[in-house]
Amino acid sequence: MSKVLVLHRFHGLNDDATEEQIFDRTSFKVFLGLHIDDDIPDAKTIWAYIKRIEQDGR
């Protein structure tokens, strides 16, 4: 999920757009170490991860 956050912040994407781009872009999947058939994190999972990091003060 840390790599997902890197893509999220670096490309200035919102949670939904991050999910969509991971699904759509092969380069994102390669960066994340995902294969074509692997499940990708959905927008709610990305949102929850970001909120958890913010609560921890990071």
Image (cartoon, grey):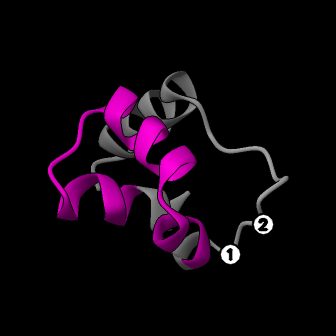
Q: Taking 30 as reference, is 28 left or right?
A: left
Q: Residue furthest right?
A: 37
Residue 42 appears in which quarter of the rendering? top right
57 or 4: nearer the viewer: 4
Q: Quadrant of the C terminus?
A: bottom left
Across and down, in percent, residue 44 comes to 52, 22
Q: Residues within 10 Å of mark 1 (few under 14, many from 20)?
A: few
**Residue on which disc 1 sits:** 33
> Callout 2, which amino acid?
His
- The residue that label 2 is drawn on is 35
Nearer-the-camera pick, 11 or 55: 11
The residue depicted at 68 percent of the width and 75 percent of the height is 33
The percent coordinates of residue 48 (x first, y second) are 49, 29
Q: Quadrant of the N terminus?
A: bottom right
Element carrying mark 1: loop
23 part of magenta stretch: yes
The answer to which of 50 and 37 lies nearer the viewer is 37
Q: Is residue 11 magenta?
A: yes
- Residue density around tag 2, few if under 14, some if 14–19, many if 20 or more, within 10 Å: few
Residue 9 at x, y = what percent? 22, 56
Q: What residue is drawn where x is 19% and y is 64%?
A: 10
Q: Which residues are magenta?
A: 5-30
Q: Secondary structure at mark 2?
A: loop
Amino acid carrying label 1: it is: Gly
The mark found on residue 50 in the picture is: none
Drawn side of residue 4 relative to residue 23, left or right: left
Whole-angstrom CA distance, mark 2 to mark 1, is 7 Å
Decide whether the magenta segment is chiefly helix, strand or loop. Answer: helix
Residue at image point 38% right, 40% down:
50
Mark in the foreground, 2 or 1 = 2
